[in-house]
Image (spheres, grey):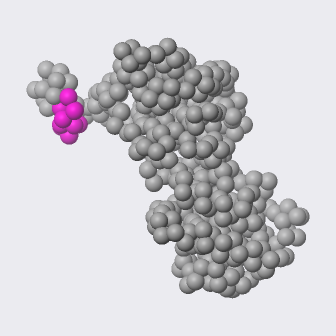
Amino acid sequence: MCKSSDCSMKIFDSGDLEIALKQWNDLKMKFSCTSRELAAKKADSQAAELTNILRPKTAEPPSPVEIGANKKLHSRSRVHQFARNAFGSAKAGVSANKNNGVVDDAAPAQNAATDHLTLLQLLALNALDLTAPASNVLLKNRLNNWVQLSGHEGSFAPAGPGTIWKKSSPDRIEIDAYEKLMKDTLASMVPHFYKDVEYNNEYFIEMQDLLYNFKNPAVMDIKMGTRTFLETEVENTKARSDLYEKMIKVDPCAPTQEELETKAITKRRYMQFRENLSSSAELGFRIEGFKVHGEEPTKDLKMLKSKDEVCKTMRQFLNGSEKVRQQLVTRLQNLRTKLEKSPFFRQHEVIGSSILIIHDGKRAGAWMIDFAKTTPLPEGISIDHRSQWSHGNHEDGYLTGLENLIAVLKESGKCKTKSNAC
């Protein structure tokens, strides 16, 4: 739910729009270089579907200050005229529809086809809503695009200085998790959640951009838990030949004698087989991917299994920075302390969630992300997040993974020579 203190109204007067127009013209000059123009166009096309999202799905009644400010709102045709002046033939996707006394400047007119502004144009037009000059912000977003690792491609787009939009699902599981986490002891350990947004029957989360305050960051996505699938996903006990084929394609020696004869396996068997391919089953976490500045993302890590292999990869990511390593150990130890005190963690199974590690060689941080499979425990069920999973007990192994991740970071600092296994 969007609180009036969390989201500002998009108010335009002639002065506002003239400033936005000037910033847009300045920005066009900055992109006069052909290579930058191409980079901007490419980024714009990727973010096109998110560009008209200006308002949350619901909003609180306006405050007296907002009501006074609304009197300055220009007509839709006036806004469109400035948009045409600034952006040529493109039309501003802004309308002044009233909803319970709140001006909704994101909702298109009923049964009207609304042209999409590019993200670049949208932020320029709404420059006064930003906390930094639009031209600088947009230039940063275009030249340093959000790092998208394994499983997240196409899920994020920069929304402004320090914020991003993330695609969500209509079941509201992740939104509900973030709303609860904002009131929990874990609030400082997750990205700040601002609001949920619905647009064109799609759902998005507006949240903190964790990369914003890092310069040329290195990023690692670590999937947590000894179990990364929901119990409901493996309730069907029917043996399937397609899953058997997938298994033998990866490891022809994996099937048991019975499975070789039937040439079929259950979904539960296949999912556990996958967990055992990586370090998830043994260590309680696996490295999904990482990226260091100036290099392509490293994603092919699903077969990384032993502690020595994980340690070696971690040192590659840290680039030998002892300062960063120590900061991450401290941060993750703090996370463990907060998890053990957290009512949210005590009442939920955390499945498929990741820890996102970011560093720039000098500063480092780690945050819990991805809560699309984080659900409340059934009534009467309690878990310690360490015990071995069996169907029905809902154990996820999250703390097992966190403790092993801390141990890997500590051991990574002991490896000084190439001959060492780490």
Compared with 136, 363 (above or below) is above
Residue beneath the point at 56% across and 84% down: 89
Residue 329, quarter of the rendered image: top right
**The magenta stretch spans residue 388:** no
Q: Position of residue 113 (x, y in %)?
A: 53, 80
Q: Farthest residue in the left direction?
A: 261
**The magenta stretch spans residue 242:** yes
Compared with 118, 86 (above or below) is below
Q: Position of residue 406 (x, y in %)?
A: 54, 19
For the residue pair 290 and 362, the one nearer the viewer reads as 362
| Numbered-mark total | 0
Residue 67, quarter of the rendered image: bottom right
For the residue pair 138 and 399, the one nearer the viewer reads as 138
- Quarter of the figure with the C terminus: top left
Residue beneath the point at 18% across and 32% down: 248
Q: Which residues are magenta?
A: 240-251
Residue beneath the point at 57% across and 66% down: 119
What secondary structure prevails in the magenta region? helix
Residue beneath the point at 48% across and 52% down: 155
Q: Position of residue 65 (x, y in %)?
A: 88, 64
Q: Position of residue 300 (x, y in %)?
A: 34, 37
